[in-house]
Amino acid sequence: MHYWLMKSEPDEASIDDLAGAPGQTLPWTGVRNYQARNFMRDLMKVGDGVLFYHSSCAVPGIAGIARVASTPYPDPTQFDVQSVYYDPKAREEEPRWMLVDVSFVRKTPLITLPMLRDEPRLADMRVLAKGNRLSITPVTADEWRVITKDLAKG
């Protein structure tokens, strides 16, 4: 089993949107970074744990816990000329961008970046690395335990 931190802007898809979605599941659309895409395409498995992170908002942080709910499949937004995620180089017979579905597990109290930085056991967490801008990053099993067992109580 793998663990992941997946960032979403809450005005696009929040933990509340996930909780209220049909089947409490949403497709993770719009990833346009090759490394993040490769994580989804090559490494994510159904059942993997997800830290649902609100980004590009007043107070960014982990807002909930989710699970990977599907195997990877082509992101349909790459083919939609009306979508902000449209990619004119993508073809249905040769998609460039993949996604996985994510399902809701539970909300957590907001775990902010300062809270993550204040926890010595998370010092090497990739989301805390200077210059990290990836929307999807791996999380170690130890980091997952610290966050879900110690920081996410509530």
Image (cartoon, grey):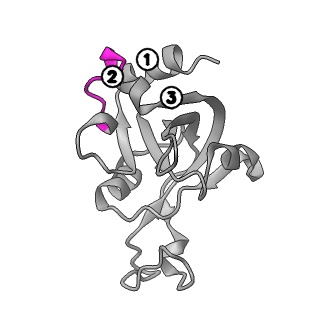
Q: Is residue 118 above or below residue 79?
A: above
Question: Residue type at mark 1?
Answer: Val
Q: Are marks 3 and 2 in contact (CB under 8 Å)?
A: no
Q: Distance from label 3 to label 2 (Cα)?
A: 13 Å
Residue 125 falls left or right of residue 81: left
Question: Which quadrant of the figure contains the C terminus?
Answer: top right
Q: Distance from label 2 to label 1 (Cα)?
A: 8 Å
Element assignment for label 1: helix
Q: Which residue in the structure is indicated by mark 3?
A: 111
| Residue nearer the viewer, 22 or 83 | 83
Question: Which quadrant of the figure contains the N terminus?
Answer: top left
Q: Position of residue 7 (x, y in %)?
A: 46, 47
User: Residue at position x 66%, y 31% from top?
Assistant: 106
Q: Tell me, yes or no, whether the highlighted magenta stretch contains residue 123.
A: yes
How crowded pointer 2 is (Cα within 10 Å; few <14, some 14-19, many 20+) is rated as many
Residue 54 falls left or right of residue 16: left
Q: Which residue in the structure is indicated by mark 1?
A: 146
Q: Is residue 23 above or below residue 127?
A: below
Q: Is tag 3's residue or tag 2's residue first in the polypeptide sequence?
A: 3
Q: Is tag 2's residue or tag 1's residue first in the polypeptide sequence?
A: 2
**Residue 55 in view of the camera:** yes
Q: Are marks 2 and 1 in contact (CB under 8 Å)?
A: yes
User: Residue at position x 39%, y 47% from top?
Assistant: 136
Question: Residue type at mark 2?
Answer: Leu
Q: Residue furthest left?
A: 130
User: Residue at position x 58%, y 47% from top?
Assistant: 102
Q: Residue furthest front?
A: 58
**Mark nearer the viewer, 1 or 3:** 3
Q: Position of residue 16 (x, y in %)?
A: 69, 44
Q: Are marks 1 and 3 in contact (CB under 8 Å)?
A: no
Magenta extent: 118-126
Q: Which residue in the structure is indicated by mark 2?
A: 122
